[in-house]
């Protein structure tokens, strides 16, 4: 996920929450962050020039790889999100919440655990769970031994819809991502991403 400034991220997810789960119109232009600047992902010369200014001293090859990664992630994520909303009326963020809970060992998670798994703020998760509960896909449960702890548990209806969403999501990934790559290129990406993640983790550990 591109790193947004916290305020911008919260504002964006709040807008998405109000619109996506209620099938309201959404902004047509997706955007990506290039060196801290939000840019449209249209691949235009203007966007490229602005990103070049935001990444001074970076070689053309590195800049192309980085901008390509950000633009591809933003565009495909937006499209996958739109696919789910159009077919089942549930956004990608809610799918990730349902998936995380369904695949837990007990079929339920603490609200804090849901937020951690989905990489969303507690307030954002609370609103998502409320909407999913209203639709009969999740239920809130209290902890018998600690009234402060609240669990989110997936229902049978939630599991049924999740199975449908997983099929749609997988088909979308195949069409929008893997169809453009050869088997060799897919294998190369599978080997490269762990190296990038390990490098990032090493930098974070040393800071």
Image (cartoon, rainbow, N blue to C red):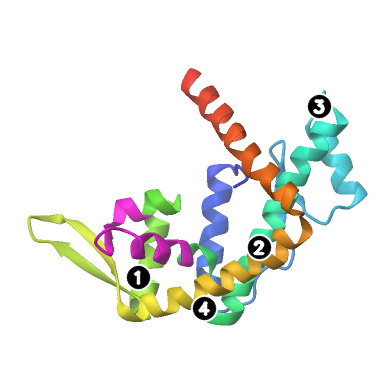
Residue 65 appears at what percent x and percent y? 78, 39
State the separation of the CA atoms marked 4 and 3: 42 Å
Q: Which residue is mark 1?
A: 130
Q: Dots 3 and 1: beta carbons under 8 Å?
A: no
Number of numbered tags placed on the structure image: 4
> 87 or 10: nearer the eye?
87
Q: Dots 2 and 4: beta carbons under 8 Å?
A: no
Q: Secondary structure at mark 1?
A: helix
Residue that appears at 58% across and 67% down: 170
Residue 88 — which label? none
Residue that appears at 56% across and 79% down: 23
* Vertical position of residue 88 compared to residue 190: above or below: below
Most distant residue in the left direction: 145
Q: Which residue is mark 4?
A: 22
What secondary structure predominates along the stretch shown in magenta?
helix
Residue 33 appears at what percent x and percent y? 70, 44
Residue 15 appears at what percent x and percent y? 56, 64
Quarter occupied by residue 127: bottom left
Query: In this view of the protein, can residue 21 be seen by the observer?
Result: no
State the separation of the CA atoms marked 4 and 1: 13 Å
Q: Which residues are magenta?
A: 95-114
State the separation of the CA atoms marked 2 and 4: 17 Å
Q: Dots 2 and 1: beta carbons under 8 Å?
A: no
Q: Which residue is mark 3?
A: 58
Most distant residue in the right direction: 45
Mark 3, other Cα within 10 Å: few <14 / some 14–19 / many ≥20: few
State the separation of the CA atoms marked 3 and 2: 27 Å
């Amino acid at each position: 996920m591109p790193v947004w400034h916290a305020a911008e991220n919260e504002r964006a997810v709040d807008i998405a929450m109000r619109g996506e789960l209620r099938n309201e119109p959404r902004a047509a232009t997706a955007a990506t962050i290039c060196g801290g600047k939000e840019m449209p992902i249209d691949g235009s010369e203007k966007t490229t020039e602005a990103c070049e200014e935001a990444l001074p001293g970076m070689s053309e090859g590195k800049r192309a790889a980085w901008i390509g990664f950000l633009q591809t992630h933003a565009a495909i994520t937006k499209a996958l999100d739109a696919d789910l909303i159009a077919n089942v009326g549930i956004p990608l963020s809610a799918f990730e919440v349902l998936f995380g809970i369904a695949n837990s060992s007990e079929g339920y998670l603490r609200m804090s655990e849901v937020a951690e798994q989905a990489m969303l703020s507690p307030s954002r998760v609370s609103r998502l769970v409320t909407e999913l509960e209203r639709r009969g896909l999740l239920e809130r449960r209290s902890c018998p031994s600690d009234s402060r702890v609240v669990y989110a548990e997936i229902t049978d209806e939630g599991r049924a819809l999740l199975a449908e969403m997983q099929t749609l999501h997988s088909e979308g990934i195949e069409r929008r991502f893997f169809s453009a790559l050869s088997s060799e290129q897919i294998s190369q990406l599978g080997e490269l991403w762990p190296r990038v993640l390990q490098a990032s983790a090493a930098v974070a550990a040393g800071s």
